[in-house]
């Protein structure tokens, strides 16, 4: 699982501190023959509106004789009546504590926490003296059948694509238009779930959707019972977060229910993995989350665009980028735009403003566009799909065009070392090879760095080390291409320091960024572990001098499941 993290907001959690008394009063230890709460007791009780009592099991270690034990309770008296004692008859080691409740006062979905405690003199040392649980009268729900859902939440943290599958949907009997999806992210339904992933086998996960106002749909906090090794995953929408905190809602972040389809704008929802962080992070990063109500046909709004090479017009000697395009069968129309930029946002804004030429497409696979190129550089092409006037999908690709203007460089092996990542990934990348350019003694590269690309930097005769502005090989699922460069040049001043070399260690003062802003910044190192016999004299240190090592283990592609980047929590997605 490839973990990404966006530090746009966090919710503070308050913790209670407990201190120990240091007085010298002696407390009598619990007796071995007393009562206790069994470990098999439920953690929650689901009550009914037409009921009035429920029972809590209590056990004792010695069944001989009748006995009564004292109990205290934290239950709210306006809802519950808890007896102060529990009694056992001769010959029985179990009894039920009968708790009465006022169903009319409690009402639906009003979860209450209750703690019960046996008097210390009555408690057995072989069981639990206290027992905490919740009690609730859940509102009634009716199953509507199987809906079709496109998932776009786990895409925030993991290198997976949105996927479409069926899941049961229920409607609340008391609030028409209030829905919940049953176990949408657990083993029973979710296609990406792995056998090693954890969930409560006795629990149920839900995604709640309040579409009682179809123009202002929101997602209350939803515990999914899904755990991909970083703790249970919860969801909610941005506007629900605003509502919880007494803030004004954002009209652009409401979901909608139209033509039997519930959808939300891109990045209008939030996700949390409780063991990973206390923060909530943007989800629905592709804007792909949709719920098709039972019986509503699923529409194919898929888009795809890729760069397949250059075309040169023999008559004009001009170049064009060859773009392969595919558009889903339910897309009414689509447009492609392209600019000399690394930013998808720049292209979208230019397309909307009419500032660049666009190319029209209809539904269909394997279509081709020839888009003229004026110069070499990094280009971004975007395809936007429409159903009528509504934008229903988009895709983009960024690529480099050379136009044959750059000479092929030759390189000589210098050293082998370990690169230590700190600003996007964290950890050591061993066995990477350092090369110097044969025609430019100040130009160096580390091969198979990042996501299996070359890392270029300049090392001048005066000792100055400067990381070039370059693509890392990483394409972020939300923000596109991730780039790296010298921090001082990115910021435009020397306050953050510069890269350097000393005693066999390069310290690269880098910033990892996308078009929207910064992920992390600060020093990362490349430590030389072996040098070639022909290495430049300035490559110093205690590394062992060797010939060219042809058996160096090549750097693996880091798009796999287990290499997890960790982003800085100290900086938001904003430029300096």
Image: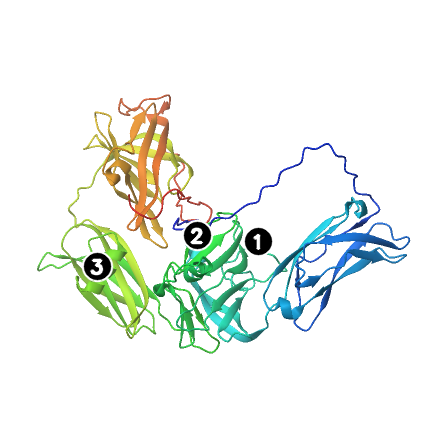
In this view, 124 is above or below 110: above
CB atoms of marks 1 and 2 within 8 Å: no
**Measuring 35% from the left and 32% from the top, which residue is drawn there?**
526
**Measuring 41% from the left and 51% from the top, which residue is drawn there?**
9
**Please, what secondary structure does the residue beneath circle 2 have?**
loop
Q: Nearer the viewer, residue 521 or 238?
A: 238
Residue 257 spot, x, y in % from top left: 41, 73
**Please, what secondary structure does the residue beneath circle 1 have?**
loop
The residue indicated by pointer 3 is 338
Residue 359 spot, x, y in % from top left: 20, 67
The mark that comes first in sequence, 1 or 2, is 2
Q: Can residue 547 be spotted in the picture?
A: no
In the image, farthest residue toward the front = 78
**Measuring 37% from the left and 21% from the top, which residue is drawn there?**
542
The mark that comes first in sequence, 2 or 3, is 2
Q: Is residue 359 left or right of residue 20?
A: left
**Please, what secondary structure does the residue beneath circle 3 have?**
strand
The residue indicated by pointer 1 is 198
Mark 3 Cα-neighbour bin, 10 Å: few <14, some 14–19, many ≥20 = many
The residue indicated by pointer 2 is 157
The mark that comes first in sequence, 3 or 1, is 1
Residue 457 spot, x, y in % from top left: 26, 35
């Amino acid at each position: 699982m490839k973990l990404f993290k966006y530090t746009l907001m966090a919710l503070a959690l308050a913790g209670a501190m407990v201190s120990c008394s240091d007085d010298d009063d002696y407390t009598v230890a619990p007796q071995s023959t007393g009562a206790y709460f069994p470990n098999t007791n439920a953690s929650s009780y689901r009550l009914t509106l037409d009921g009035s009592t429920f029972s809590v099991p209590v056990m004792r270690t010695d069944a001989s004789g009748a006995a009564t034990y004292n109990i205290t309770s934290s239950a709210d008296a306006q809802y519950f009546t808890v007896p102060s004692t529990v009694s056992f008859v001769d010959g029985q080691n179990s009894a039920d504590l009968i708790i009465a409740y006022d169903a009319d006062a409690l009402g639906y979905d009003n979860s209450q926490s209750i703690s019960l405690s046996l008097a210390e003199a009555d408690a057995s040392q072989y069981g639990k003296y206290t027992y905490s649980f919740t009690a609730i009268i859940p509102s009634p729900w009716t199953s509507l059948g199987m809906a079709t859902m496109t998932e776009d939440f786990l895409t925030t943290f993991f290198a997976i694509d949105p996927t479409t599958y069926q899941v049961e949907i229920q409607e609340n009997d008391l609030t028409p238009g209030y829905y919940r999806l049953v176990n949408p992210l657990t083993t029973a339904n979710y296609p990406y779930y792995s056998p090693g992933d954890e969930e409560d086998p006795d629990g149920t996960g839900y995604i709640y959707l309040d579409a009682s106002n179809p123009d202002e749909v929101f997602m209350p906090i939803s515990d999914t019972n899904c755990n991909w090794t970083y703790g249970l995953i919860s969801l909610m929408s941005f506007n629900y977060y605003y509502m919880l905190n007494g803030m004004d809602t954002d009209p652009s972040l409401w979901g909608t229910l139209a033509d039997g389809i519930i959808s939300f704008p891109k990045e209008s929802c939030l996700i949390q993995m409780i063991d990973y962080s206390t923060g909530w992070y943007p989800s629905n990063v592709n804007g792909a989350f949709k719920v098709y109500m039972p019986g509503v046909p699923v529409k194919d709004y898929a888009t795809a665009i890729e760069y397949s090479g250059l075309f040169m017009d023999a008559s004009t000697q001009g170049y064009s980028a060859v773009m392969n395009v595919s558009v889903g069968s339910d897309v009414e129309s689509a447009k492609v735009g392209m600019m000399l930029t690394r930013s998808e946002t720049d292209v979208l804004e230019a397309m909307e403003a009419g500032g660049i030429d666009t190319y029209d497409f209809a539904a269909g696979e394997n279509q081709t566009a020839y888009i003229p190129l004026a110069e070499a550089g990094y280009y971004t092409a975007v395809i936007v799909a429409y159903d009528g006037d509504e934008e229903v999908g988009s895709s983009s690709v960024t690529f480099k065009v050379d136009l044959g203007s750059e000479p092929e460089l030759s390189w000589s092996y210098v050293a082998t070392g370990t690169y230590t990542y700190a600003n996007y990934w964290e950890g050591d990348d061993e066995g990477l090879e350092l090369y110097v350019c044969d025609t430019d003694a100040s130009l160096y590269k580390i091969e198979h760095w990042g996501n299996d690309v070359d890392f270029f930097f300049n090392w001048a005769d005066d000792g100055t080390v400067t990381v070039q502005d370059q693509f890392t090989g990483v394409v972020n699922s939300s923000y596109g291409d991730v780039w790296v460069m010298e921090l001082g040049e990115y910021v435009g001043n020397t306050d953050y320091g510069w890269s350097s070399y000393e005693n066999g260690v390069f310290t690269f003062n880098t910033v990892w960024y996308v078009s929207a802003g910064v992920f992390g910044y600060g020093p990362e190192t490349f430590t030389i572990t072996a040098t070639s016999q022909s290495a430049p004299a300035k490559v110093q240190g205690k590394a062992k001098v060797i010939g060219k090592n042809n058996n160096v283990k090549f750097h693996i592609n880091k798009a796999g499941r287990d290499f997890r980047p960790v982003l800085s929590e100290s900086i938001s997605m904003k430029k300096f």
